[in-house]
Amino acid sequence: MWRGCLLTGMLVWLAATPASAFVAYVSNEKGNTVTVIDTNSWAVTKTIKVGQRPRGIEFSRDGKFVMVAVGDDDTIQVIDTKTQEIVDTLPSGPDPELFTQDAAGKTMYVANENDNTVTVIDLEKRARLGDIQVGVEPEGMTISPDGKILINTSETTNMAHFIDTTTREIVANVLVDSRPRFAQFKRDGSELWVSSEIGGTVSIVDPVKREVTGKITFEIPGLRNEAIQPVGIGMTKDGKTAFVALGPANRVAVVDGATHKVLKYLLVGQRVWHMDFTPDEKYLMVTNGVSNDVSVIDVAAQKVIKTIQVGELPWGITIAQP
Amino acid sequence: MFRWLIGTIALSMMATGALAADPVEIHIGYLGHAGVKSTLSLVQQPADNDGIAGARLAIEDNNTTGKFLNQRFVLDEAKVKDSDDVAKVATDLAGRNDYIITDLPADALLKVADALRERGTVLLNAGAIDDRLREQDCRADVIHIAPTRSMLADALGQYLVWKQWKRWLLVVGSHDQDKLYADALRRAATRFGAKIVQERTFEDTGGARRTDSGVTLIQRQMPVFTQQAPAYDVLVAADESEVFANYLPYRTWDPRPVAGSAGLVPTSWDATHDQWGAVQIQNRFVKLNMRRMTALDMQAWTAARMIGEATSRTNSGDQKKVIAFLKGKDFSIAAFKGTRLTLRDWNWQLRQPILLADGRMVVSVSPQEGFLHQVSELDTLGVDRPETKCKLQ
């Protein structure tokens, strides 16, 4: 009885503690810095100096490191999350922008904008395993949930390239709208979403048929059509809700994951780029490239609750356990 | 015996593979004029391959995409001298190509358009900025990639007005194209609420552009030429002929900025433009051509990319289908300007933002904020639909 009371008490206490603190790393494209934010206090806890033009940024699968592509230094820098200092570099090809890792965290795939290639890196050995020739200006990178297919989007070729991760060969090319920038699978692998910045749409691709089965378009009253430029995409694990950053439209669209209908537009900062969820999916943080801040969205309420000042021209963001 | 059979099967499979893999070939002609103009500034002297170099890069880009779609693009280059029969050269080129990118003066372009009219060859005007080609002299088979003088003048005018530099001293060269540019600048001043406080003409009295003691003389001439002007904010120079404009910055009697043909120049492209992914194409261009990319290079690149884009979208080598797509409502092209570029369906002019560059940096990009339009803000640049004199046929 007493034990039961104590247990209940503890549970109540646990529930009452504020949303468990995570840590967010934001790459600042012009500032050549990475801003570290504590998601409990929503305060900047550190600013780390990195190489030239940091953009793509991601936690290693084991959470021990944050990797950031510093394009103008032609490398990827590795930040130790304990010391929050740069401890290593990875041999990417020239001008790395976005990258993705396999589920085991052993292999990394990097889009090299200048070379029309995707570079494959062995993360343990820190060695370059090879290159895959893709279309003009490779950018968006993602891996299918089963790990079999790597997706790369090429901005001037306007395709999503399907690459077999075993043979490292292109097995399909799906034409999407102009300047595809970001690709994301639904967690169940049933759909691949590709944003087209200049085309102004998000293409829904059937990963089995490897063809476009639908397109999400956006319309914001009072805003010229050309300003709507979809970039980053975030999807909840259950696939029910998606968020699409609309660039200079200064808004994030909330999209029904099943019907693909736009539910609402959330006003954020200027030129919204990329986003990431806190691991508990309570919050979504988006980077605002021109207004030098990050907006925090309450996922359940679908409301912007906070704006945090970061470095110059924030671009990428990754969030995990501290 | 069995092994031999497998060999045969493999061989026949290879053969069919080869047959199926024959790519669709798309032939694009490029018709330029021989000889380059002489510029006041040595670093602005155009290269021999100005323009063509951009088309070549676009062909490479198209072919990178084309290898995924089994399409192959080929560029067929020709240059005409003033003494050549341009219609004949064009007809010859049209025999081998469905599309021709042109860098020709207005009259030569019209000659070519009229000579090829029956054949249905589509011309992509990458070089001529004359408004009349999109107005009274417009042709249904000519698509204009180069911006017009009025688009360039409006882009500059919007910025100067935004900057509150509304009193302009207009200095015009004595050649025809200088006068046309001055017309466009006057129109821009009227449209956007600037005032031309005075106009002066700079007579071209001949003379070399390179001399061994040039600076000394110019330093004495330019202050005197700009003396006793009414109060003004900015000197706007119309000098497409490269006679005097680049002599003006830092030498005006009053300390005033210079814009137009020197100083702050409106242009479709600049070697210093690096926003919106532009640094990627700048790098590709330098790698291929060992020099920096000019406005004409970019206009030719865009022309060849438009054919590539429409060919991949229609997945077809059929010129009629490709052109129908180009002229249809779904067409747009990405060209590192931060927005999609589309065609004005009343005269086939490509809508585009215009950069304002000073030779070292891009200072701004027009249209400027606040210049609104009911269809596209890009239509605040140049002659708009309600004012057009074009009747496409």
Image (tube, coloured by chain):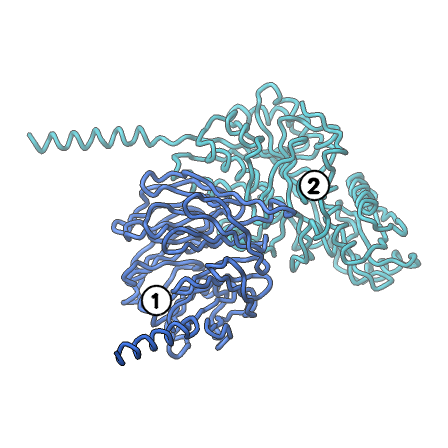
- Subunit of label 1: A
Q: Amino acid at mark 2?
A: Gln
Whether the residues at callouts 2 and 1 have beta carbons within 8 Å, the answer is no
Residue located beneath label 2 in the image: B374
Q: Quadrant of the C terminus of chain B?
A: top right
Q: CA distance from mark 2 to mark 1?
A: 48 Å
Q: Colour of chain A?
A: blue
User: Is residue A181 rendered to the left or right of residue B171?
Assistant: left
x and y percent of residue A230 in the render?
A: 51, 50
| Pick the front one: B161 or B18 | B161
Q: Nearer the viewer, residue A28 or B70?
A: A28
Residue B375 in sight in this render: yes
Q: How many marks?
A: 2
- Identified by mark 1, the residue type is Ser
**Res B61 label:** none
Residue B278 appearing in the image: no
| Mark 1 crowd level (few <14, some 14–19, many ≥20, 10 Å Cα) | many
